[in-house]
Structures are given as C-alpha cells and as structure tokens.
Amino acid sequence: MAMRLIRVWKIVGWYFHGKNGTNKSTSVTTMNKKNVAVKYNGGCGGHLLYYFLLASGKYSAYYKEGGIVKKIKENDCKKIKQQFYLQFNKNKEWLKYETWPDNTDYKDSSQLFFFCGKSRPDYIKICPYIKDYKTWFRTVLYKKTNIFRNENITLSLVKKKYKALLDEKDIFDTRRKNCDYYFEITKFVNNLTERKKLCDFLSIPHTILMEEFISHYNDLHKELKRRTSW
C-alpha cells in the first residue's frame, strides 16, 4: 500500500502547483476561561501542536488504554517524548500510531484538550490551519487523512477529490470557528518567531523540547516540502 501511494503521489505531481501559506493570528482576552484546547481540521498539524504544547511542561494529558485512564503529568518529558516519537516514527505510516487524548474533563486545571470538532466554549482554543488549498490537498493525500482516510487511493479518486475541492476553492477555509488564536501551521513550523508568539499568548515557556519536536516533524515532511509550503 505504501509503495502504491508513493507511485500515485508521483503520478499526480504534475497536477498541482503549491503556493506558500500566510499567517493570520487573532488574539482575544482569555479572562474567565479555563483549560487550553487544540481545535483543528484534519491535516493541519493538530497532533503536532498538542505535543508542542505538552513540551512546555505546563500541561497534562489523559489517555485511555483498554478502559484504563492514564495521565501524563506536567513536565513528564520522558513520557511525552516516548509517545511523540512513537506516533511520529519516520519508519511507519502516518496514522498507524495516531493516539487521541481522552477529552473527559477530569477537573484538572492543567489538562490539555484536543478537538477535531465541537468543543466547550469556556476553553482557550488554539487553531492551526493551512491557508493554501493545494498545500492542504497534498498534505491529506500524503498522510491519507481527512478526505483520504480509509480510502483505496487511486489516480481517479485523487482527480475526483481534487475537482470537488476546486469547485469550492473560493470558500476554502480550514480554520475552525470561534477560536481564540489562529496560526498558519506551515509558517509556524518554519518560523521561530511564530512559535514564540504562541508561547507568549499562552504565557508558557518556549523550551528546547518544543524545538526538538519541530525539527523532527520538519524532517518527516521532506517529501511534502518539495511541492508545498511545508
């Protein structure tokens, strides 16, 4: 399957011409709000952002394994790194070890939430997005997520999906509504200033582990970087 996807990827290479994304951040007051939540559209780096924020040492995360709730405590770098490198293993398919946090509210003020859909209004919601529709399309194709999740990917399917996207490109927008902070993810991973701005907004430290994760994530995008704004 992996080799077939690579062949399809190369065949459709002529079909698209990626453009660089641009950044647009909107900050609003965080008074009277509670926990921080990542809120995103598939293919826009939501999982990376979640680990990036955990790497600040200021947030905790909860996971369910076999019905058992496990907590990653604030500043538990060993567990955070272990899970990050398991999920983003350069020798594995993108979604093979994708792990979703448990969004049950455990009344923990440091709990970091993760949503690819609806979320509670009292969270501080951070939304990564991709502005360029061609970059987004290439990304979800390459990672087999969003519109390509669980699909048998063929050239005809790719063309069909792309045509449908073109029909709506004038209203294309991967930003989730009603978030407190927006940033263009392809710019974020390539611009240190953008990452520091997010840390400043949340009043969290910018750490060495954060940059370690960014470096590794960028390394996994070498194939995408040739054709997109990644």
Image: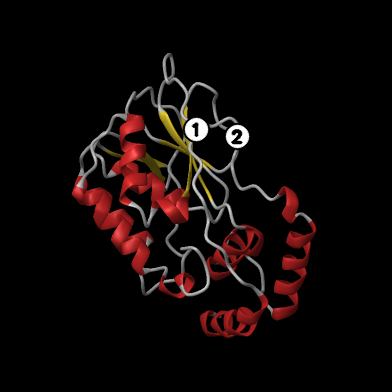
Query: Residue 105 occupies which quadrant of the picture?
Result: top left
> Colour scheme of this structure image?
secondary structure
Q: Secondary structure at mark 1?
A: loop
Q: Any mark on residue 118, and which?
A: 2
Residue 89 visible here: no
Q: Residues within 10 Å of mark 1 (few under 14, many from 20)?
A: few
Vertical placement of 2 versus 49: above or below?
Answer: below
Where residue 123 sits: x, y (%)?
47, 26
Quadrant of res 198: top left
Residue 109 at what x, y percent from top left? 34, 23
Q: Classify 219 as above or below 171.
A: below
- Among the two numbered marks 1 and 2 on one chain, the one whose residue lies closer to the N terminus: 1
Mark 1 and 2 residues: CB-CB less than 8 Å, in contact? no
Q: Nearer the viewer, residue 64 or 166?
A: 166
Is residue 205 depicted above or below 173 in this figure? Answer: above
Give the residue displayed 41% in from the left and 15% down from the top.
31
- 164 vs 224, left or right, is right
Residue at the disc numbered 1: 26
Residue 169, image x and y in percent? 73, 55
Q: What secondary structure is found at the residue carrying circle 2?
A: loop
Q: Is residue 166 depicted above or below 15 in this figure?
A: above
Q: Amino acid at mark 1?
A: Thr
Nearest the viewer among 6 and 24 is 24
User: Which residue sits furthest top?
Assistant: 32
Q: Is residue 77 left or right of residue 216?
A: left
Q: Amino acid at mark 2?
A: Lys
Identified at 54% across, 70% down, the residue is: 142
**Separation of marks 1 and 2 at Cα, in angstroms:** 20 Å
| Residue 143 position in % (x across, y down) | 53, 66
Could you tell me if residue 217 is visible in this image? yes
